[in-house]
Amino acid sequence: MIVRGVFGPLVGAFGHPTVSGLENLHGLEPPFIVAANHSSHMDTPALLLALPPRLRRRTLVVAAADYFYKNRLLGGLVSLSLGTVPLDRKRGGAESIGTIEQLLAEGWAVLAFPEGSRTRDGRLHRGKTGIARLATSARVPVLPVGIQGTFEALPHGRRLPRRAAVEVRFGKPLRFDHYLDRPVDRFVLRSITDEIMYEIMMLSEQVYVDEYASASPKPSPAHATPAPKQEASVDARSGAPEGSPPGPLQS
């Protein structure tokens, strides 16, 4: 109710959000992980508003503790309005993973951004392996989501949003049971992560860059300009678009 009542008019005023791929949610019930590209503070409310109410009510959001919870008032506001769960990005580790595993075990869906932080240049960055670790340990599917237009509306470094066409695209849930008959080492986690990022790339139509978002230089000037849409040319050897994550679809 708070998400729709507070953020619905705000996102609608600046984003004109449209939704596609809802047919991929038929029969999908928590627990599962929602994995999306991260371009803007507008991503979370736009995605939550796009979810059917039956799923939105059972979805919690992983939020950066070092950003949203430094201020007690801000932390309380985002927790109440968006249903956030603080995650320490600097320490990470077993404690944070364990907290989210418990939420999944209790039947929640969890929204997380595998890039770890917002893109500063509009491109899709290398995913971190935390979502893959959760998907295999909790044995839950991952729902890939591509969000378009939020970078144009409210990019990193911009204080006030501007009007843009926003679209949320839901992909088909990904299941990784075929990895569970072998040791889940760092190579398996990277392969799963790259598979997730590939699906997000196809949905968001972003240019992919094989570096972490936190390592990407801050654009100049401060108000980032949108990255051009990628015209996906196909790698003849792999059948995958050039510039895609190196994973199971590429040799």
Image (spheres, rainbow, N blue to C red):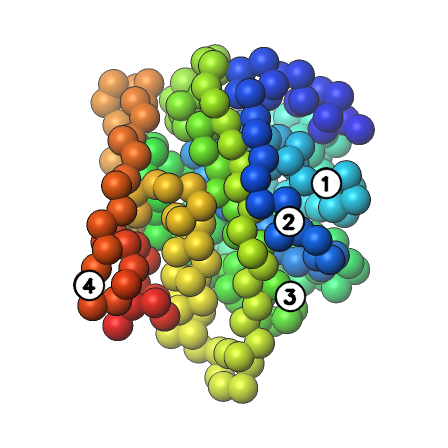
- Residue 84 percent location from the top left of the image: 67, 40
Q: Nearer the viewer, mark 3 or mark 2?
A: 2
Relative height, residue 43 to residue 220 (above, below): below
Q: Which of marks 3 and 4 is in front?
A: 4
Mark 2 burial class by Cα count in 10 Å: few <14, some 14-19, many 20+ = few
The CA span between labels 4 and 2 is: 31 Å
Lower sequence index among marks 4 and 1: 1
The CA span between labels 1 and 2 is: 11 Å
Q: Residue 140 has which mark?
A: 3
Relative height, residue 90 to residue 138 (above, below): above
Q: Nearer the viewer, mark 4 or mark 1?
A: 4
Circle 1 sits on which residue? 52
Q: Pick whichever, 28 or 128, lies toward us.
A: 28
Q: Pick whichever, 14 or 217, lies toward us.
A: 14
- Mark 1: amino acid: Pro
Q: Is residue 65 left or right of residue 119?
A: right
Relative height, residue 245 to residue 228 (above, below): below
Q: What element carries label 4?
A: loop
Q: Is mark 1 on a helix, strand or loop?
A: loop
- Residue 64 percent location from the top left of the image: 54, 41
Answer whether labels 4 and 2 touch (C-beta < 8 Å): no
Lower sequence index among marks 4 and 2: 2
Q: Could you say which quadrant of the image residue 76 lies in?
A: top right
Q: Residue at x 57, y 39 (%)?
A: 20
The CA span between labels 4 and 1 is: 39 Å
- Mark 4: amino acid: Ala
- Residue 110 percent location from the top left of the image: 65, 51
Circle 4 sits on which residue? 236
- Mark 2: amino acid: Glu
* Quadrant occupied by the N terminus: top right
Q: Could you say which quadrant of the image residue 186 lies in?
A: bottom left
Mark 3 burial class by Cα count in 10 Å: few <14, some 14-19, many 20+ = many
